[in-house]
Amino acid sequence: GVEVGDAESDAHYIADKVAGLRIFDDAEGKFNLGLEDIAGSILLVSQFTLQGDCRKGRRPTFIQAARPEQAIPLYEKVRDALRAKGYTVETGEFGAHMELNILNDGPVTLLLDSGKTF
């Protein structure tokens, strides 16, 4: 998800982080392997709902989600940076209703953010 205020530096941060994460199990079942270790590829899907804020009220607000004119170029920079690192990157269609069939291998969800504060 691209947030209002995100910049090209954030796109590069995310690409570097994704490429370097050790989130795949080794022989002992520990997160010690990265994409290169498993000869993995990437499915990069835009998801503005990651910016949904449900802290107040009963309906999420998406005020922090970047508008497409800002989000699309940053999304494409992440894609291009990962491909430049040699990874196979498949993408969805930005802003489209997509139905994905995936196998979620474990109960893990990770939040990646450049760590900037507002």
Image (cartoon, rainbow, N blue to C red):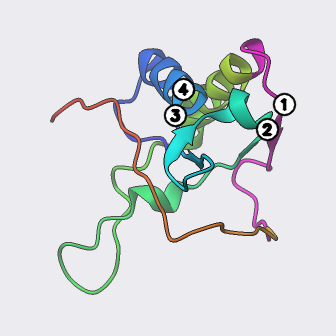
For the point 48% across and 41% down, which residue is it? 2
Mark 1 vs mark 3, CA separation in Å: 16 Å
Q: What is the C-alpha distance between the residues marked 3 and 2?
A: 13 Å
- Which is nearer the N-term, disc 3 or disc 2? 3
For image coordinates 77% across by 67% down, the residue present is 102
| SS state under label 3 | loop
Q: Closer to the N terminus: mark 2 or mark 1?
A: 2
Q: Which residues are magenta?
A: 83-99
| Mark with earlier residue (2, 4) | 4
Task: Tell me the crowding category of disc 1: few under 14, some 14 to 19, or many 20 or more residues within 10 angstroms, Cα based.
Answer: some
- At a point 76% along the width and 59% down the height, the residue shown is 96
Are the residues at dot 2 and dot 1 in contact (C-beta closer than 8 Å)?
A: yes
Viewer-side residue, 3 vs 102: 102
Circle on res. 21 = 3
- Pointer 4 with pointer 3, Cβ within 8 A: yes
Element on which disc 2 rests: loop
Question: x, y (%) of residue 22?
Answer: 52, 37
Q: Please tell me whether mark 4 sits on a helix, a strand or a loop.
A: helix
Q: Amino acid at mark 2?
A: Ser
The residue under label 1 is which amino acid type?
Thr
Residue named by callout 1: 88
Magenta-span inclusion, residue 23: no
Along the line of sight, the residue nearer the viewer: 6 or 107: 107
Which amino acid type is marked by label 4?
A: Gly
Residue for badge 4 = 20
> What residue did someone put label 2 on?
41
Vertical comparison of 56 with 23: above or below: below
